[in-house]
Image (tube, coloured by chain):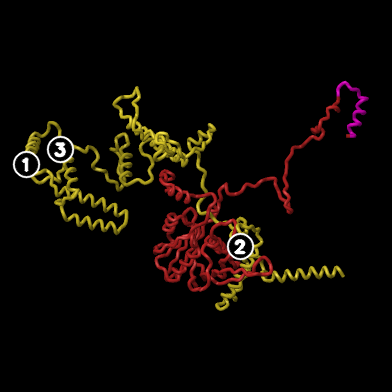
Amino acid sequence: MASCSIEDVLAKAERDEAEKRKGITVNKDLDLEFDPGHLLAFDKNRIDNRELKDIKREDFLHSLARDNTQLLINEIWKLPTERIEEVIVAKLPDPTTLLPRQKPAPKPKPPTKWEQFAKLKGIQKKKKTNLVWDEVHKEWRRRWGYKRAKDDTKEWLIEVPENADPNENQFAKRNKAKKERVARNEYNRLKNIARAQKIKVPGMGLAPTPQQSKAELAQAVNIAKISTASVGKFQDNLPKEKTPKNTGKKRKFQPLIGDFSSEKQKQLDLLKVMDSKKPRLNVTKAVNKQMREEDMESRQKNKKGFGKKGRKGNMSAEAGYKSPGGDDREEGAFLALRCEAQAHSSPNLLAPEDLVQAL
Amino acid sequence: MTHSGGIVKPKTKRSKRFLQSREPKLIEGLKTSMIIKGGNTSETVSQALKDVYALKKPNAVLYKKKNMVRPFEDSTALEFFSKKTDCSLFLFGSHNKKRPNNLVFGRMFDFHVLDMFELGIEKFVSLRDVKKDKCPEGTKPLLVFAGELFETDREHQRLRNLLTDFFCGPRVSAVRLAGLEHVLHFTAVEGKIYMRSYKVLLKKSGCRTPRIELENMGPSFDFVMRRSHMASDDLYKTAHRQPKGVKPKKKKNISHDTFGTKFGRLHMQKQNLDKLQTRKMKGLKKRRGEDTAETPAAKAPRTDE
């Protein structure tokens, strides 16, 4: 009797469980494959084509989706949960579907020269404070960088040591030493990179720059071309290469004892020019040339910036173009100074030929 | 920038952080996608692109202008865009007479095209046309693939992998149970793929696991498979190669029972049990001067121990 009642109780409990679970059980021919890490489920069961006829399609897909999602949710609810700040959260395992990477794995960088040395000697990195107390300025300053604590290039008073040349500029000496240190540091950094990437670095001179302009590349090509024993005389040109014509001497001086008549003529012309009352410099032409140069510069700058602004700039330049150097613009005065400087600097008065008025 | 290999050092901390975020990492984060319009796009295609962008909202870039790109012929433009925006997934939409309402789903490895699949839209219901509640953007969707084609056909397998990659969202270690609101359901039948997007309603059932009701929410697509470009097997394998640091090191000689008991294993050399080192009793040490007659007497108390 008792055993019957126990069996009954168990059967009833089972039935109750089944009732409860009725809402969430789904019958499928084949079990689904789950990947809870990606919240993914894959249903391999056959889909009957007839169910996908136009009218019934949406309903069929809806019910199929509901069943599959129910199974997936059942699977997710089996995962261990924890409570984080009043929210119940299920911990997901690692995903099983392998997805390809975006970029290849990073390669470990080889150690730099200093790192190798430090490892060899067993030198550990010491943690240093960012700020250092500067007694002179009575404040906390950076250990290195802009406005640092001990910057020997920024001292206003340097005592000349006994064994130094009294005419030597100590400030310039310190600045130069700093520049050399910076250059050496940069060079060593580049050498470390080259060693890491196993590229050969040229000894001196042509350091690798990321973007070389056309002029720099042309210069490099020319230097390479003349770096032969016969200074590039027997180097053939590439199919479309043109030999640059303006290499060699830039100033041609007449020989000391040459054509006497032409020399006499030149000297007489010189005297004539010195005698004449007209100024050597055509101010209007000079001002126009200056304005043109400035317009080119501003146009280039505006091209890099905004297109519309560039157009505006051009228009104002063109407006200004029309009025020649009769304005009392700053440019006029500046130009005068500039042309004077040119006139003083060039010993050969025949140099600015285009500005010279016709004699 | 990084192509110069560190020769040009970043001048500000912000640019340094930017470059570091673009470097290859051991464990990769989520993939961003770029959504591009082709030379000629129809209304359906533009709306479809906008809807996919809405689905993938924070991790996607939508290009507004048209680009004359042909992905299957020349993918250099796509690679350039991907380098600029650091996106490894792309979706390209176009429309012409020969291929109406065309969408190309694709992914990149190392800024070169890995896989591309061209799907034509036959029927499309937009987000705007379905006037129901939507779920918040950025929710990680549940993905369900149905149809034995996804298992048997190689192209469909790869497409399944690509769609998982495209729609899966960021990798998370834990998920809020109440926040599973969005489900994307893909069905593959005879060369057609039906994509439906539903909002999940968790209803009370008798037990802990809730009963699911679905509500048709988002965009629904009827795709037809057109061309595809799959990566070669070795390229696919290199794309999956994980660096050494990622896999956790297996601890050897430690095993767990079904009950949770932890078992360890020790490996010993062969021991000579005669010469085993036990406790020494100084009083019982054999002395040299003693006779053999005393030894049995000495032995008896020893065995008693």
Residue at the (39%, 63%) spot, across then down: B65
Marks 2 and 1: CB-CB under 8 Å?
no
Which label lies toward us, 1 or 3?
A: 1
Residue A348 circle label: 3
Quadrant for the C terminus of chain B in the image: top right
Tell me the distance, in whole angstroms, between the alpha carbons under discs 2 and 1.
100 Å
In magenta, the rendered stretch is: B287-304
Name the chain letter of the residue that bears numbered label 3. A
Residue at the (72%, 70%) spot, across then down: A18
Is label 1 in a helix, a strand or a loop?
loop
Identify which amino acid the numbered label 2 is placed on. Answer: Leu
Q: Is residue A248 left or right of residue A144?
A: left
Name the chain letter of the residue that bears numbered label 1. A
- What is the display colour for chain A? yellow
Residue A276 circle label: 1
Is B295 magenta? The answer is yes
Marks 1 and 3: CB-CB under 8 Å?
no
In the figure, the red chain has which letter?
B
Which label lies toward us, 2 or 1?
A: 2
Is label 3 in a helix, a strand or a loop?
loop
Q: Is residue A59 above or below residue A201?
A: below
Tell me the distance, in whole angstroms, between the alpha carbons under discs 2 and 3.
90 Å
